[in-house]
Image (cartoon, rainbow, N blue to C red):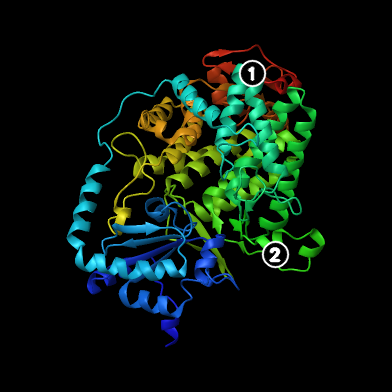
Amino acid sequence: MANEMRVQWREWSDEAFAEAKAQDKPILLGISAVWCHWCHVMDRGIPGDPIHTGVYSDPQIAAYINEHFIPIRVDNDQRPDINARYNMGGWPTTCFLTPDGEVIYGATYLAPAQMRQLLPRVVEVWRNEREEVLAHLRAHAQAVEPPAAPVGALPDAETVLNAVLTVITRNYDRRNGGLGGGQKFPMSEVWSLLLLQHHRSGEAAWLDMVAQTLIAMGTRGMYDRVAGGWFRYSTTPDWSVPHFEKMLEDHARLLPLYARAAQHCQQAGKTAEAETLLGVVQSALAYLQSTLLRDDAEATYFAGSQDADEHYYMLSRVERAQHTPPFVDWRLYADWNALMVSALLEVSVVLGQPELEMLAQRVWHTLVRLCVQEDGCVVHSLIPSETGFQPARLRGMLGDQAALAKASLDLAQHVPALRAEALQLAERVVRFAVQHLRAPNGGFYDTPADENCQGLLRVRIQPMADNSAFAEALLGLSFLREEPRWREIAQQALAVFAEEYRRYREHAAGYALAVWRAANLPDEIALVADSDEALAAWARAAHTPYAPWRCVHLLHTARDAHIIAARGYPTQRLPVAFRCKGTTCSAPIFEPSTLTTGV
């Protein structure tokens, strides 16, 4: 009887789908996350709450599920590919599937009373209305097939920027900052796009929107003012009541945004705003290093998240010391840690803290050693154990390939001693994606082909956000390696979404940034020296000012003599720097302070 008291969850596997087919049962797919509050409620309920008593811990519900369904449980962070295809708008996701993995019906959180009504209805539909359901699913599948033929040219960058900026402006909450009048998420790429526009136009309004939003996000309820760190989102328009999860991904995206926004504010005479933003950066870094960082002889990386616990986070510092902190997910996620490498490198130069650059190097070395296979395929996640790390099944995801390629390219532009190794690693990771993920239309699929994939995983999708991120990596590699082919591939990938981006509205900000960079030449800075120490000092100067699209070449006279000779850089006096745009370069620069004034 003990097994009947809980849902008998299976893993997502061929065996589970085979069982569903053999028994002719629909599948109940539950997508959850270790940090998800309402996932815990659906599992265990809320003590003392007469409505939210727990679905999967209810003996009658569990028994009915075990008898009439094949239940499969998926962790969102471990299997983002499954989540991308089956998520019903949030976590938890409750999805009912055919034995072939097609969606019959889906929802998010369901209370016990709702689940008791829904379960027999799904069983009835599967038994008595199956043909109608299957016919509808076949028609829908045919309607969503992506175009197979190559698409047209890269869209006009100014048109894309103006379209996305117009949506952002119309949706901006001038009272509270952020977008819309309901719950609010960080949306880092939106504010990065506005910083670009402020830089290009000089118009104060763009910076005002960024500063208002970031300060609200970093000083009100969405920020943990006791321990530091951002919560996942605000449930209210004034940023006062958060959803209390803390996600590594959000911190990796917000840290450099806050640091660069502080620079803009300082330059615009907004000293108080700049100080506030930098204070949030320092506080968030302290949280990350005290709570989410593992840094020992075996590995250096950041944990993926810290669980939501409303009661704990409402306590004072003294009161928290008397309670157990919320659960930390110590699994290593390749994409989020790669984003942290890029963030630490950028923040290190803005804050003048070289120890952050050293930390970024240690994280990068861990990722390369544990997550990158010989062919350049990136393992999505690793599970720590007493004997080391166990790699998860998922690998070769476009998001992982993009983030690690970008982190490697950033490292090659900050750390002279690692330039050659980091560039080679980036190229290996990019080549794997181009070989295994590129679609006939020029875009990129999110996962490699797998004939054994079940359900909707058989449908290969091309996410705009991941394509944009990978295009950014391709662009950087193109200029750092001086190989135009990579830029052409990036432009082709972005062209796939030339019409589709409009329906994403403000969520197309990342795409707009990528298109702008794909259409423009970067500000290139070539640094030439005969020692890594000199190159490192000049590199910090080159990276200190904000630049929306920049490539820094760290050229050592011994290691890179062929590049220096091919470009015709004079070496009579070292160190020396050159600012270049396309084929036009400046006169030699002999003072690093000249570079800190901006490009």
**Residue at image x 63%, y 64%?**
327
Is residue 482 visible from the viewing direction of this image? no
Instruction: Give coordinates of residue 207: x percent, y percent.
Output: 66, 26
Q: Amino acid at mark 2?
A: Pro
Q: Name the disc covering residue 3, or none.
A: none
Q: What residue is disc 2 on?
A: 325
User: 242 or 256, which lies in front?
Assistant: 242
Task: Report which residue position mark 1 lands on.
Answer: 203
Q: Amino acid at mark 1?
A: Glu
Query: What is the crowding at mark 1: few (fewer than 14 residues within 10 Å), some, or many (at least 20)?
Result: few
Q: Return the x and y of residue 524 as percentages of the image width and height.
A: 58, 22
Sequence-earlier tag: 1 or 2: 1
Give the residue drawn at x 60%, y 73%: 48
Query: Which residue is at a point 39% across and 27% down the rendered structure image?
Result: 488
- Check disc 1 and report its element: helix, strand or loop: loop
Q: Position of residue 563 (x, y in %)?
A: 54, 24
Q: Is residue 533 left or right of residue 338?
A: right
Query: In whole angstroms, how far apart are the C-alphas of marks 1 and 2?
Result: 44 Å
- State the residue in front, 253 or 2: 2
Q: Is residue 224 above or below residue 574?
A: below
Percent coordinates x, y for residue 463 in the rendering = 40, 42
